[in-house]
Amino acid sequence: MSDPIVAVEHLTLAYPGDRGRPAVSVLTDVSLNMARGGALTLVGPSGSGKSTLLRCLNRLEEPTAGTVRFDGRDVRSLDPRELRRRAALVMQTPVLFEGTVRDNLWLRPAGTPGDFSEARLSEVLIEVGLEPLFLDRDAATLSGGEKQRVTIARALLRDPQALLLDEPTSALDPPNAALVVETISRAREARRLSIVAVTHQPELVRHLGGSLLFLVRGRVEAYERLDGGASAIGDARLQAFLAGESPRAVPAKP
Amino acid sequence: MSGASSVIDLSLGQLGLALLLVGVVVLVSLRQGLGLERDLLVGSVRTIVQLYLVGLILAAVFSAARWYLVVLVVAVMTAVATQAAVSRLAKPIPGGHQIAALALTVSTAVTLAYVIGVVVRVRPWYEPQYVIPIAGMILGNAMTSAALAGDRLQGDLRSRAPEVETMLALGFSGREAVQPLVRAALRAAMIPTVNGMMTVGVVQLPGMMTGQILAGSSPLVAIGYQIMVMFMLAAGTAMASLLFVRLAAGRYLTAAHQLRRYLL
Ligand SMILES: Nc1ncnc2c1ncn2[C@@H]1O[C@H](COP(=O)(O)OP(=O)(O)O)[C@@H](O)[C@H]1O
Ligand SMILES: [Mg+2]
């Protein structure tokens, strides 16, 4: 693949064991590639290392071995703070800080480049499907779906090249989840964003297309392209992926 | 008239009478089935042995009045306080021992130097009668506040890790991301001292003042010292907890602005 935005080679990650116990291996020899503007969905049973892999991409985690490249550069050669602005992470449980929605959108380290004007804040809120009136709302009073859309707005405001989503809809009820899926799909088209998402939400997977990577106990069990939508790998196989069963059990379409 | 002439020296017989008070507690423990008799006995024996030993050592240091002996005693006290502060933490902090030693040594040395050299102006500076009890008070309070601050920081890091990581993901430095937790831990550590300043003398007489009065000092002299001690403890605890929390927070962060979650 020419000029990928994210490239991972032979990534291994282990946590040091507690008090002399052997190290806990979380990821083993993971490699992947994602084209600029592309999409990648990480699936697998709970505890298989999806979040950890995602967090390696913006260097919230430090691999024990292997390399992670972002936009052609080894992430270890980038300032982590800069990397995290360019690869914005949205977590499973939205974290909003005390204050209004405006305070939360504004929240940034001194010297962060970008337009944080009132007009821009309103624009981004509209982009995630919220009224500009929300700027003055106390963040604590928002519903779960609204909170998640504010965290997506907070990420988009920084004009990231890539969006890293960790189960962005799993804490939401179906209508709110649908709104968030729609928000993500729309932002992606409008901005040519690259997206890596951990999700078991079939609609989100279908909207994103790209590739699917199935992790089991920290190893890549299957890694397939979804070109032309989910139909390319077949519904039974996609269902197996999303249900967290091994897709090996379902034969690939010839 | 020297007040000291009125001090009643307690004889062994009188201490034996005081021990009867513990005997009453042992009886209560036996009758109520509290199961505390053993601990009470061991505690009483330890109280007697430890205090006598300390008394003997202090008497020797006082009569020798050599600066290096005084420094040695304060160093041993610091080591013991360090151990006690670390053992009070619910979960060990990596490198906690060195951090506590550094925080307690620096805060005690600075506060003690100011009090001895600038405020009280003790001559010679190592006069054990002043240095040792004052160092003891600073250390005791510094130890408690450092442990309080450390406990709070650890608990908050565990419960507020998502907040910290959200800050990191937004491009904040590790230091910026833990700042709200550092602030909360410092407040928690400082509150007992500040509250103590609010109620001192009203609710109960502080131990040092009680001791001075019992030893024959005029209450007005004792009050002068107590006021100084309150200010001194405020400074000592603030410095100790600030140093300890800052250094401890650093142990949970990496140079690449990552939270070392596996330590939590
Ligand atoms: N801080 C940590 N210390 C030790 N082990 C951890 C830590 N965080 C995650 N793990 C382990 O790593 C594995 C993968 O976790 P995670 O990436 O969160 O999985 P997933 O997102 O797929 O559910 C799990 O077995 C988990 O227990
Ligand atoms: Mg996860």
Image: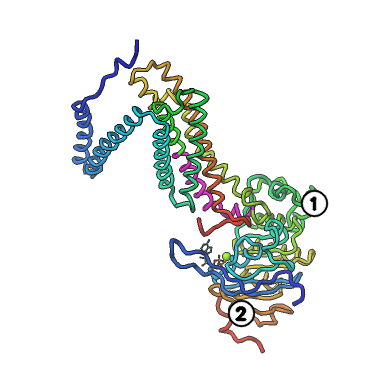
User: In the rendered view, does B188 fall on the left or right side of A181?
Assistant: left
Question: Which of these two is toward me, A187 or B146?
Answer: B146
Q: Quadrant of residue A11?
A: bottom right
Characterize the local packing of mark 2: few (<14), some (14-19) or many (20 or more) Cα atoms within 10 angstroms: some
Local packing at callout 1 (Cα closer than 10 Å; few below 14, some 14-19, many 20+) is few
Q: Which mark is residue B220?
A: none
Count numbered badges in the picture: 2
Q: Label 2, on which residue?
A: A222
Residue B105 in sight: yes
Image quarter (top left, top right, bottom left or bottom right) of the N terminus of chain B: top left
Residue B209 position, x and y percent, is 39, 23
Tell me where residue B223 appears, x and y as whole percent.
44, 20
Extreme residue toward the bottom, this view: A254
Pointer 1 residue: A115
Q: Is residue B192 left or right of residue B11?
A: right
- Reply yes or no: does residue B151 show up in magenta: yes
Q: Quadrant of ligand 2?
A: bottom right
Chain bearing mark 2: A
Above or below, A151 against A162 in this view is above
Q: Main secondary structure of the magenta part?
A: helix
Which residue does the image show at 79% across and 54% down from the upper left?
A: A123
Q: How is the image coloured?
A: rainbow
Q: Label 1, label 2: how many angstroms apart (C-alpha)?
A: 41 Å
- Under mark 2, the amino acid is Ala
- Callout 1 and callout 2 share a chain: yes
Instruction: Tell which subunit mark 1 falls on.
Output: A
Contact, mark 1 vs mark 2 (Cβ under 8 Å): no
Which region is colored magenta? B143-167
